[in-house]
Amino acid sequence: METTTYTALCERAGRWWTIRVPQIEGLSAQVRSLDQAEVMTRKVIARHLGIPAESIKVDVLPDAPVPVARALQARHAARQAAEAAGQATREAIEALARDGYPFHDVATMLSLSRGEIEHYGPVSDAATGLGSGPLPASAG
């Protein structure tokens, strides 16, 4: 089933959150708690458009104070950096294994322990001691 994504702009109004969906003029809702915004918005959109709620994806965007927005941006950047670092590390381990570097040199170059290297999964060249077989006792 194809899904369509809508945005739920949420603004605090006393003890409630007011939700506005900019893609559908005049469509709004209220929830008591921000964690209810996604479900409520999906229900309101589905009812308004006469389509199944399962075909709707909602991105909840609360109007948050500046420190919250900064924290969210930093957390998002950190997640992206961690993913990039993981991918680069996997690629480095595989490249070093293909080039025949011994396990302990790979571990030292990347500042990783035995367990950390194992975390990245088996490497294509088991002959270097970096593959899915047993690792050398001198490692890490």
Image (cartoon, rainbow, N blue to C red):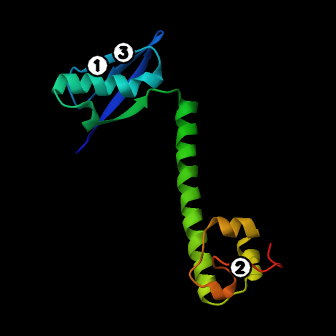
Residue reaching furthest to the right: 138
Q: Secondary structure at mark 1?
A: strand
Q: Quadrant of residue 96?
A: bottom right
What residue lies at 60% left-to-right and 76% top-to-bottom?
92
Mark 1 nearby-residue class (10 Å; few <14, some 14–19, many ≥20): some
Q: Nearer the viewer, mark 2 or mark 1?
A: 2
Q: Secondary structure at mark 2?
A: helix
Q: Quadrant of the N terminus?
A: top left
Mark 2 nearby-residue class (10 Å; few <14, some 14–19, many ≥20): many
Residue to which mark 1 is pinned: 28
In three-dimensional space, the C-alpha distance between marks 3 and 1, rounded to whole angstroms, equals 7 Å
Question: Mark 2 and mark 3 in contact (Cβ < 8 Å)?
Answer: no
* 12, above or below 9, in the image: above
In three-dimensional space, the C-alpha distance between marks 3 and 2, rounded to whole angstroms, equals 56 Å
**Amino acid type shown at disc 3:** Gln
**Amino acid type shown at disc 1:** Ser
Query: Which numbered disc covers residue 30?
Result: 3
Query: Residue 122 appears at what percent x and percent y?
Result: 60, 74
What residue lies at 67% left-to-right and 68% top-to-bottom?
118
